[in-house]
Image (cartoon, coloured by chain):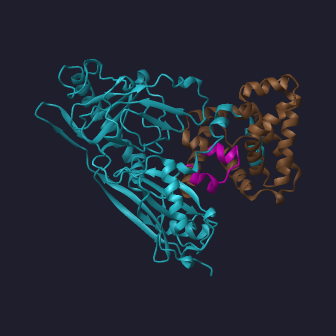
Amino acid sequence: MKAMSGFEIFEKMTNVNDKFIDEAAEMPSPELAVVKMSRWERFSHFMNSGWGVAMICGIVAIGVMAGIIAAGRAGEPGVMPPGHNESTAETGVENPRETNDRPDGRFTFDYRGISERESVSKRDINFRFYASVTNVGETFTFENGPEHFYPDKVLFIHQGTDYVIEAVISEDVEPMATVPTGTKGELTFVVYIPQEAEPGLYALRLTYGDESDTFYDVLTVLNSEPETDPPAKSKEKALEIAENHMRQQDIPIDLDQFRVSAVGVDMDSGYYHVSYVLPLGGIATSYRFTMKVTYSGQIRDYEGSTWDPQAYYATYTDEEVQAAITRMGGDEIEGCYFEYENGKLYVCAEEIRSINPPNVETNEAGDIIINSGCGIDHDHVFYEEEVIRTEN
Amino acid sequence: MKDHDIVDLYWARDEQAIAESQRKYGGYCHGISMNILNNESDAEECVNDTWVVAWRSMPPKKPGVLRTYLGKLTRNLSINRLKERHREKRNPDLVIALEELAECIPVPEDTTDERLCAYLNEFLEITPALDRQLFMGRYWYGRTVREMAPRYGLTANAVSQRLKRTRQALRAYLEERGYTV
């Protein structure tokens, strides 16, 4: 029997379910895209791998135990840190809008989330969000793509202490059911971190419905004082500073050709990193400027400041890049990224070979302490292959 | 203006409905048409025709999601326009997408639209969201791999691989249900 042609199928696909059409109607903002894997993205990439899923399952299993213990202790008088009022001690929940002694500015959330994750549990937790840097006591905003992301419960668990902080889901957020699938939405969770909270890693646990799906992720609470030159206060400010800086560079082309490809917050320092990309025709031909932006307008860790027109105008075809990827290991390698060094372009990839289990200890009080931070110890193999031009 | 207000304008036979549709969804529809036709003037004509068809169809139609309704109209009009062209003039990116589709969907020629869509809906329902969006982006909206990659924070190779795996999964899904050619 004859099969339908691709064109016929394409035509008949017009009437697939509206929700799928709507969901894909708008692609994510390019500002949220990441052109090169940072350490965090490599971690994210790892977490998306089979090893990552195995790791998550392990962490969730251990973490649920610790969560139960910690949650149990949260209700005990005297367990919560000093400065917590009674209502907080009773419930573990405090609405910062009702708090007068808000430790504004002392701590900074630095959380970028995981750019993509698939089917780590029964529920399809596939989301893409980035949180803006905010001060404790202010809103903690998840942006972009909340369609599968409306937890019933949000907990922040400080690793190694007894803090269990339940986030309050803001009342002015519309119920998820009223947000059309695929629209760019925004959820706001109002969270509160006690003033005495220690800087360090916190686990973020999101619970979904009665299936008890629990998900752990990690965020860093940084002590922001004393700060001589703190991070730019907002993404917009970081962009403004970065753009001014770019315009001061002696670059012999029209700066307007550049586009901002990524604005992200560095996991370790809390500073904004802004990347500019100059597309030169092919996927391998873009060049990137990345800079770390501070509040006073200083630019740190500026990459790409030495302009070498000859090198940067080198063009590569997709076939040349694909040939390098094939030499490196074929199509099975995912998550390749580019490195430009000494006038040569390389495709690179990293493969996780083995991981060491998270460090689990029991303290004197008998609490289980899990170190499931993003610095998961693992052995990896690094691949690198030069992209060779086939024509002059 | 909200979608239901625009639909109300259509129903009230108020020509402002077309202006509002153009303002709100002109770019969206134009993108769909351009991806299929790869021709500016043809795409513009298709988008203009979309408003005409919308005007004629509302009432009696009262779409729940105006965006997808208009998008479907544009897509159909663009496909019809594409049929009028000689094969060699087709958008080369789209031709590749069509070949990929034919390769992964072993559906007999006599399968009805409804049945094919039912299979696709079932399959898309169980497909992870990111892969689903890439699949729809490629095969419904006609976007290129290179266009989607930076927007989803992936490399072009990663997008291609994900699409390939989704196509393979779709083929297996259909074959499990007895559809082979």
Q: Which residues are magenta?
A: B134-152
Estimate the x, y position of residue A250 in percent, counting from the top left: 54, 73
Using the rendered view, name the quadrant where residue A194 is placed.
Answer: top left
Residue A81 visible? The answer is: yes
Outermost bottom residue? A392
Asked whether residue B147 is drawn in magenta, I would say yes
In the rendered image, what is the letter of the chain coloured brown?
B
Q: Nearer the viewer, residue A288 or A190?
A: A190
Using the rendered view, name the quadrant where residue A378 is placed.
Answer: bottom left
Give the dominant element type of the magenta stretch: helix, strand or loop: helix
Q: Is residue A251 left or right of residue B49?
A: left
Q: Is residue A252 left or right of residue A369?
A: right
Estimate the x, y position of residue A249 in percent, counting from the top left: 52, 69
Asked whether residue A254 is drawn in magenta, I would say no
Position above or below: A343 against A53: below
Q: Is residue A52 left or right of residue A30?
A: left
Estimate the x, y position of residue A46 in percent, counting from the top left: 39, 50
